[in-house]
Image (cartoon, rainbow, N blue to C red):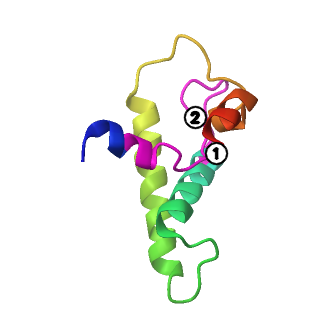
């Protein structure tokens, strides 16, 4: 699949995850875990883990949160903080994707 088609297919994934890099004060452990949990919910399709899915779900959240914290630690500083609103909450973006 060409890159443009690939990006348009997944470009709107994870709508509720906001940019954590460059926050002042830096992203907290809770913010990182919340973003990891939202990501795992989105990619797994599981919003409420059950007894059969809970262990795998929570392990994935732990792993994604750890890797996210490492990524944020290892990236260089941003020149400007992220915008206040996530992109998909801005009216001009919502209108473009509707």
Q: Which residue is mark 1?
A: 31
Where residue 84 appears, x then y in whole percent? 72, 26
Horizontal side, residue 71 vs residue 23: left or right: left
Q: Quick one: 9 or 27, which is closer to the camera? A: 9
Residue positioned 58% across, 49% down in the render: 35
The dominant secondary structure in magenta is loop
**Which callout, 1 or 2, points at the residue further toward the start of the chain?**
2
Categorize mark 1 by other alpha carbons within 10 Å: few (<14), some (14-19), many (20+): some
Where residue 87 appears, x then y in whole percent? 64, 32
Residue positioned 65% across, 49% down in the render: 30
Q: State whether residue 23 is above or below residue 7.
A: above
Q: State whether residue 71 is above or below residue 6.
A: above
Measure the C-alpha gap from mark 1 to mark 2.
8 Å
Please, which residue is most extreme toward the bottom here? 51
Residue 44 visible to the viewer: yes
Residue positioned 45% across, 69% down in the render: 59
Horizontal side, residue 83 vs residue 20: left or right: right
Tell me the element at label 1: helix
Residue positioned 58% across, 34% down in the render: 19
Categorize mark 2 by other alpha carbons within 10 Å: few (<14), some (14-19), many (20+): some
């Amino acid at each position: 699949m060409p890159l443009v088609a690939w990006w348009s297919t997944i470009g709107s994934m994870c709508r509720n995850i906001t940019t954590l890099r460059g926050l002042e004060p830096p992203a907290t452990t809770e913010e990182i875990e919340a973003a990891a949990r939202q990501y795992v919910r989105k990619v797994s399709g599981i919003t409420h883990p059950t007894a059969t899915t809970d262990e795998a779900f929570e392990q994935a959240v732990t792993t994604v949160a750890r890797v996210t914290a490492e990524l944020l630690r290892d990236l260089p500083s941003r020149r400007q903080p992220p915008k206040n609103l996530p992109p998909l909450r801005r009216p001009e973006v919502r209108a473009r994707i509707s």
